[in-house]
Image (cartoon, rainbow, N blue to C red):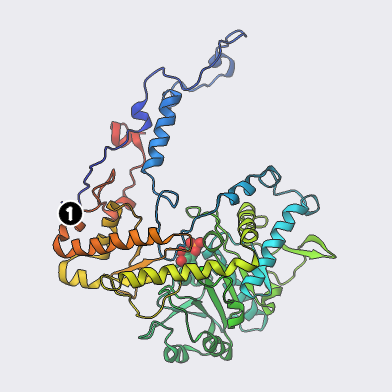
Amino acid sequence: MKGQAVRSVPLPKLIFEKSRKGRVGCNVPVADTPEVDLKAALGQVREELHLPEVSELEVLRHFTILSHVNYGIETGFYPLGSCTMKYNPKINERTAALPGFSMLHPMQPASMIPGAMEILLGVQDMLKEITGFDYITLQPVAGAHGEMTCLMLIRAYHESRGEGKQRHTILVPDSAHGTNPASAARCGYDVKSIPTDADGNTDLKALEAALDDSIAGLMLTNPSTLGLFEPNITKICEMVHKAGGMVFCDGANMNAMVGTTRPGDHGFDCMHLNLHKTFSTPHGGGGPGCGAIGIKSHLEPFLPVPIVQRVDGKPSLDWHRPHSIGRVSPYYGQFLMEVRAYTYLRAYGKEKMHEISHYAVLNANYIKARLKDVLPAAYDRPCMHECVLTAEKYKKQHGVRALDISKRLIDYGFHPPTNYFPLIVPEAMMIEPTETECKETLDAFCDAMIEICTEAVNDPDLLHNAPTSQIVGRLDETKAVKELDVRWRTKREGVKV
Ligand SMILES: Cc1ncc(COP(=O)(O)O)c(C=O)c1O
């Protein structure tokens, strides 16, 4: 039935449901010292802690079973567009776990941790070369945080020229990720939307009409979230500069360009990178990530402190920066993310770096080509690292939405692609395979998509009711967010805690 959870796999029991009074999870040796009455010795001791009482084996089974109902890049294909869910090589974890890195204290002075400073400098230097920017800071801890930091630098730049108040508007294309307008608004800017033209590019006429001396800058994602390279990028940067604005590059899609082309050469003034996407540090469920930023030298006076630099061959920190916007995060950012990114970058090396973007683009175009008869591309031209397809015809003709196709994919063993983003594509399905997938996996995914599209025509309810292979079926996504059921005692035992 539509909207109702269908369960064909037994729901694993909660650990509290497995609990039996008096059962213990560890083998404690008989004490060879006199027993002490804790309550008498310590005063207030709680009688009841509401902890599950289970054996070690039950604990082990419980968490192993839970890990099996989870889906991750290590269990299957994860084509979540715009998120670059590539495989993160295990060597990254090994180096990040080395005690010389993992046991460092953030308050240790730079002179005591030259190795860690070399890592930060190494990542900065490599990102400089990859992006074509003059300076890098690793402080921001997420992509959105990097966006905001760049906008703060842009604001400081305009203020330094006495144009801070006058330039109060940031332009954002209508295909942008939601964090772009949110970051601009968070910085106190007015946000103006720029439409996309019929070919999927920034509408140059609309941009021209929007440019005046109230414009602080433009936030442009390249390749765009439509998975398309912006062919007018140099012209756009020139237009915005002529009007006195700055151009920020949302570089979350750098996986399409790494080792091949550099935003710093396209005319941008600044950009952010998502190390947790392109440079294979793990996505942290809202953090800890790294939204490193690159800037051109005219924004350098405003960089966040401290600056990690090398003076006379030795790493050091520069705190004396009168025009700095200040800190944007504690210490130097997420240090162990930098260790992972450093490992990844060094493992690829300059010579092979282009393979990342070449294979990412090839894989996305392969999927686009294989699915073209069932799910056409929103804009029919070669895509970059992701393809945005539309399921509009299934909605119109069979009442089947992109969401239904995605949910059915779960029954075929695949993580769904991103749906309904970018907002300007009706019934959007945004597929980003990444370079780490082999042809067999791409084919298996495409075969499943083609079969599901046939099901959409012949048996739409099969898709409306999907998924049926999981411990929960189709969820009411609004209710799932608004009525979180994460407190076992209230629901399962009827006990208020
Ligand atoms: C195009 C684009 N820009 C910005 C972001 C924001 O990055 P983060 O989630 O790290 O804040 C994302 C995240 O998915 C993105 O896809």
Q: Is residue 50 left or right of residue 464?
A: right
Say which of 107 and 389 sits in front.
389
Is 392 situated above or below 483?
below
Is 177 situated above or below 198?
above
Residue at position x 26%, y 61% from top? Answer: 405
Say which of 425 and 306 sits in front.
425
Q: Residue 87: x percent and y percent?
A: 49, 55
Is 345 situated above or below 36?
below
Q: Amino acid at mark 1?
A: Lys
Total labels: the figure holds 1
Q: Residue 414: x percent and y percent?
A: 34, 55
Say which of 439 and 255 sits in front.
439
Report the residue marked by disc 1: 2
Q: Is residue 230 visible?
A: yes
Q: Is residue 344 left or right of residue 194?
A: right
Is 331 situated above or below 303?
above
